[in-house]
Image: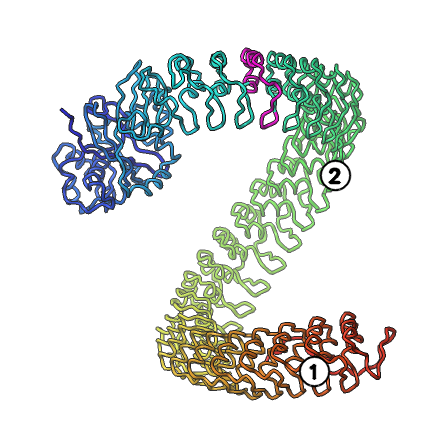
Amino acid sequence: MAKPVREAACVVAFNHLDQVLFVKRPKTAKAWANMMVFPGGKVDASDAVPTPTSAYAHIPPRFFLSAVRELFEEVDLSLTSPRLSRHVDQMTRRQWRHDIVDKKATFDQLLAATKASPTYDALLPYKQLITPVTSPHRFNTWFFLAQVGAADVAEAEILPLGTELDELLWLTPDDAWSGYLDGDFNFATPQLYLLHDLRRFGSVSALMEHTKRTAHQPSEPLLAQRLPIEDDGVITSVFNGDPLHTECTDPNGPLHRVVLHPDRSQTLVGNQVRMLARDRQFRTMVNCTDEKGRNAFMLASMLGQNDVVAFFLDWLVIGNGTYNMNLADNEGKTALMLALAHGHAGIATLLLGRGAEHSRIDKSGQTALILASFIGCTDVVHTLLAQSANANLIDNEGKTALTLASVNGHDRVVKLLLDAKASVHAIDNDEQTALMLASTHGRDAVVRLLLHAGAAVNFTNPDDQTELHMAALHGHETVVRRLLNVDAKHNILDCNGRTPLMMAAMHGHEIAVKWLLDADIQVNRSDKTGSTALMLASANGHDRVVQRLLAAGANVHFCDNEGRTALMLAAANGHVHVVQHLESNSGPLDLVDNKGQTALMLASVNGHVDVVGRLLDRSANPNLLDLDGKTALMIASAKGYENVVQRLIGRSAALDVVDPEGKSALILAIQNGHDAVARILLTRHASINLTDKDGKTALMLAATNDHEAAVQHLLRVRADMNATDNDGKTALLMASTNGHEIAVKLLINAQADVNLSDLHGRTPLMMAAMNGHEIVVQWLLNADAKTNIIDRDGKTPLMMAAMNGHEIAVKWLIDADAQVNRSDRNDKTALMLASASGHDRVVQRLLAAGANVHLCDSEGRTALMLASANGHLYVVQCLDAYSGTLDLVDNNGQTALMLASVNGHVNVVQRLLQRSASPDLIDLDDNTALILAIQNGHDAVAQYLITQGANINLTDKDGKTALMFAAGNGHDAIVQHLLRSLADVDATDNDGKTALLLASTNGHEVAVKLLINAQADVNLSDLNGKTPLMMAAMHGHEIAVKWLLDADTKVNRTDRSDTTALMLASANGHDRVVQRLLAAGANVDLCDNDGKTALLMAATNGHEIGVKWLLDADANVNRSDRDGKTPLMMAAMRGHQIAVKWLLNARADVDVSDRTDTTALMLASANGHDRIVQRLLAAGANVHLCDDNGHTALLFASRQGHSAIVQRLQNAGAAMGPDHMATTATTPEVHWPNAIMNFDKQPLVF
């Protein structure tokens, strides 16, 4: 009888760390005993209650409800709205969970009691899995993905007294898999399968994104089948798509299998398979491959599974009775190569014995011989060579079998390869030979074999290093000696100018140094940095190498490029033993480097006290100065090296030397916060009152930087506490400025003068108040600091505290009788300064202390005005009750409301109007608050003023109304609001301009449309006769032109100079506007006061498209202006080739002349426009015509030096003229036409 298949739901819950939730079933569980599983269980009858339709129509809703219920029941995670964890306490939830498990309550009852509903959107369908027919309990299970918030993760728990689960764990898929392999966790087949799927995507969130794209489509459920073959406890289960699955339709499809093995490390999942069965049904799968193209035979060879490989070779047959062992994976590797690549020599030997092909080359260019040589499989190499394997093939990196065997020191393999005539001269892609690599890695036996085989020495790599360089660098003494014995060049230089001796010395390889010195190498050779072998060894502290080099005659007096000797380098790096070896041979110890520093200074700067002591013992001078004017003591003091300082002082180092900045050792120590060093210097009586170049003493620096111990010590030795620096600042002022309370307290207790001021007149109390250091303010006041003293700007401490919003400091100062109504040089009081900066709590304190709200500053502004101007609503609220009238005006006639309006502070405007501020007052320029708001683009303020009844038709001194400003500046919303409030739409300013004209001028199309819709007169003109259409056309505002034309504006209206809109558009090159005007019936042949037509203007300025459209509209091509100039003449004169072309095509008269008888050809010739001259000549221009002075085009071109045009005109038969002969010597006096000599090359703008 078939077992029933029960429905179940599980949730793969994951958190923000991509960890998945697992729960452990107890050993007594009926299903999945002692297993780690996902939270879930069977679908209950109660889950079948009516539920909202799921977004996934192919999945019954009961699965979703069951998943939500099981997640809450087992681990207290709620996928409901609202969240149960947010609205029901933990103890109550725990009781509900117990009752649901014990069947005393249902999940549906819980939802009803808490007015919660399941959140199905939080569940993403992932997999449907049906357990095998052979299972004792069969389930049809839907697995859902769900992301859990961090807060819910912290609250997740299993029932303390429950029997359903033992443990709860959050694990990444990789950690879960590792735990399985280590035996920490048990997983059943479905969990292993799904866990592999999770790992395959790299992260749970990536899997979720993938699932979102496929979850809406029905898919075939995963039907697990357990194969009836078990071998030594191995259990194999297959899923849909596996060739052995009974419902498999694609025998060549991907493997979907879980092979459970007692040895967990052998368990394989997904696209991997371990062939452990010997049943014939496995024949169909022997050539199935994983994602890397590897079949089971290749995997067995790669993993070193001898029994499996033998099984394939002995028993598994296909087709012709043999197994094809030479198949290659995606990388071109055969089973033989894979075995060798993983060091399985035994399998490789077995495969070769069965006839495996050895000449195959993989995608990296490697052969079996190369791989065997790399890992040193001597027997395999011997077999391959015996089978005639090519020993000189190279891989993609240029390496041969010999190269790889050499680098790894496989000398027996190297000998076999050399016997097989492998080339010793092969060079890889890094330009290294086998000998170079063997020398680098110290393979002495290999080096011996290669040299015996004739390998060339002294080959250099890209860094110009030889085999000897590399052996010396790495300290391979035997290789060094062997190379020297075959006459390797020992004085050759690498790219850094270093010899093998330098490399060995630098790295402390004493024996290598010995062999190189015995080879008579040049011991004093220097590299590109000027360093010798002795310097390099000294700098790195290799004292035994130093001894050998000295014995070999190394020169201790040589300097590197920085002027440093070996002794200096050893001292700088603290190598005292090297210093001991060098000092007796170094002569004077006080040699200096390029920075003027001695060995003693270099040791001091790095705190090497032993070296300092040694050099002082050898009479090094501690009082020399480097190029920065510093002694060793100053250097050590600045660095804070106490022991070095003590040593130097003990050897009579001068205490009070100062550098060019006036800094002594004491000042440097204190400046850098080294209190202990300062104490040492002070106990040795260093001068305490020396000043640096800024006039600062040690006490000032200590106080400035809050070095309390130094301040205390300096005061104890009676440092001058009232000394001032170059800016007049005392130590107390500096400490007060920075709020260093302890330093201030120490100075006050020492009777420092609390009222001394700096050059700006600022006292310690002012600086403390300004920076809000309340404790310091209190201490200074307690020490009788003057509260009403003023600085150069007339500011008191109270003003400074108020200005910066330091409420507590203000309180202390008021309590100390500070004058609250005192004003500074700008007549600003503390109240004004606080108000301007928006410090409402300070304002409240000042008002409570009697601050006068009616006082004005030098600009006539009160505190209320300043607060309003800066938008400080809370301050305004504090002040307006005290201020009486709100309509006081400043020196510009502006009220608080105007100041708020001009700066766009709508909240302040609202407050002032609520407090009865007058909205219609005007300033000295007749501006109202409304006009000021609109001028500055503050729409919200303007709209509010309008709604509150501000007069919308008042004008400023230029006669402009609010509507004009709004329209002219494109504030469309305000225009609409003003029109709705019946603003005068046709009012004009002092220049006769209307709002519509201003909007048109600036191209504000929406405003233009609004005004037209409001019946604005489209034909009203300003005092110059210009209409809105003219202004829009002149500036090229096409859409505005469209609206105006649609409103029946007069298209041919002229201004005072008889200019039309078409002329203005044409002159300025607004081609699309020209097109619109022509379509609206604009007259193309009207002319202005100078006789200029639209065509002439367009031609003059080279607007070719406009010229074309005007000609297409039948404009008179030969109409001339008052000077007789035609469009062709002007285009020719200005050099506009395309315009000339269109005009000639329109049959322009080529020989017509102006009032001075000048033709287009003359104008083009005089101005050097060769291409235009060519066009005019082609059009039949007469080269013989003369102007009224008898000058021809040829004469014009000649006198202006246009040789190409001269040649062209002469070719056309031109002569100079009856009264003039060409000459190259001098230029005769000629009366040139004004149009030629004085024309304006800039486009005309009307």
Q: Is residue 293 left or right of residue 646?
A: left
Residue at coordinates 48% horizontally, 51% vertically from top-left? 775
Look at the image and say whether residue 384 sits in the magenta stretch. Answer: yes
Give the amino acid type for the residue marked by disc 2 in the picture. Lys
Give the amino acid type for the residue marked by disc 1 in the picture. Asp
Q: Count neighbours of disc 2 (C-alpha within 10 A) and say few if under 14, some if 14 to 19, many if 20 or more.
A: few
Q: Nearer the viewer, residue 1 or 1033?
A: 1
Quarter occupied by residue 277: top left
Q: Indicate which disc residue 595 carries.
A: 2
Q: Nearer the viewer, residue 519 or 1223?
A: 1223
Q: Position of residue 1227 (x, y in %)?
A: 84, 77
Q: Is residue 812 left or right of residue 721?
A: left
Helix, strand or loop status at disc 1 = loop
Q: Indicate which disc residue 1151 carries.
A: 1
Residue at coordinates 52% horizontally, 80% vertically from top-left? 1031
Which is more N-terminal, label 1 or label 2?
Answer: 2
